[in-house]
Amino acid sequence: MELFDEFVDAVLDLMRTARRTGGAAHTVRGDGVSVPQLVVLAAVDVAGGQGVTAVAERAGLAQPTVTRALAALERRSLVLRAPHASDGRTTSLALTPGGKAVLEETMRNVVARFGELWESLAEDQREHAVRLIRSLSRITAELT
């Protein structure tokens, strides 16, 4: 197999893995929060006061995906919905103290795991890895 063919296979594998791990059935280890739910929790933390559309934009997810994630997070008492103070047509979102704790703990765990991966790279591989991952992210975004 030529190197380019291996590159194509590797990018397709990355896309399949991202798709599989992004599903609602796949959770971030330990807390039962799916990857989309984690992304939505982080987006609510930043843009929740601006409503569901702003959260969807911040999360980079389709609005129906965000709506499903929000419903699950609300059932778990991790997110609160309330009518927007100045615009009754929209909903304001906020993390509950439990939601904030889950977000912080999960992100600590994710960052710790990334730290382990980072440490496994040789010094001369790190800059290359960052550039490569950013390039693959752009390619994947263009293909989907």
Image (spheres, grey):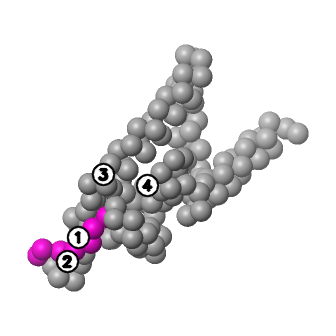
Asked if residue 115 lies in the magenta stretch, the reply is no
Does residue 46 appear in this view? no
Of callouts 2 and 4, the N-terminal one: 4
**Picture coordinates of residue 128, whole percent (x, y):** 57, 27
Label 2 neighbourhood size at 10 Å, few (<14), some (14-19), many (20+)?
few
Q: Is residue 43 left or right of residue 144?
A: left
Amino acid found under the numbered disc labelled 3: Lys
Q: Main secondary structure of the magenta part?
A: strand
Amino acid found under the numbered disc labelled 1: Ser
Q: How many marks?
A: 4
| Residue bearing the label numbered 2 | 83
Q: Quadrant of the N terminus?
A: top right
**Picture coordinates of residue 14, whole percent (x, y):** 66, 48
Residue at x 22% of width, y 83% of height: 89
Mark 4 touching mark 1, by CB under 8 A? Answer: no
Does residue 120 appear in this view? yes
Task: Give the camera-side residue of 118 and 6.
Answer: 118
Q: Which residues are magenta?
A: 79-86
| Residue bearing the label numbered 1 | 92
Of callouts 4 and 3, the N-terminal one: 4
Kindly report the distance in space between the C-alpha atoms of the residues bearing marks 2 and 3: 20 Å
Amino acid found under the numbered disc labelled 4: Leu
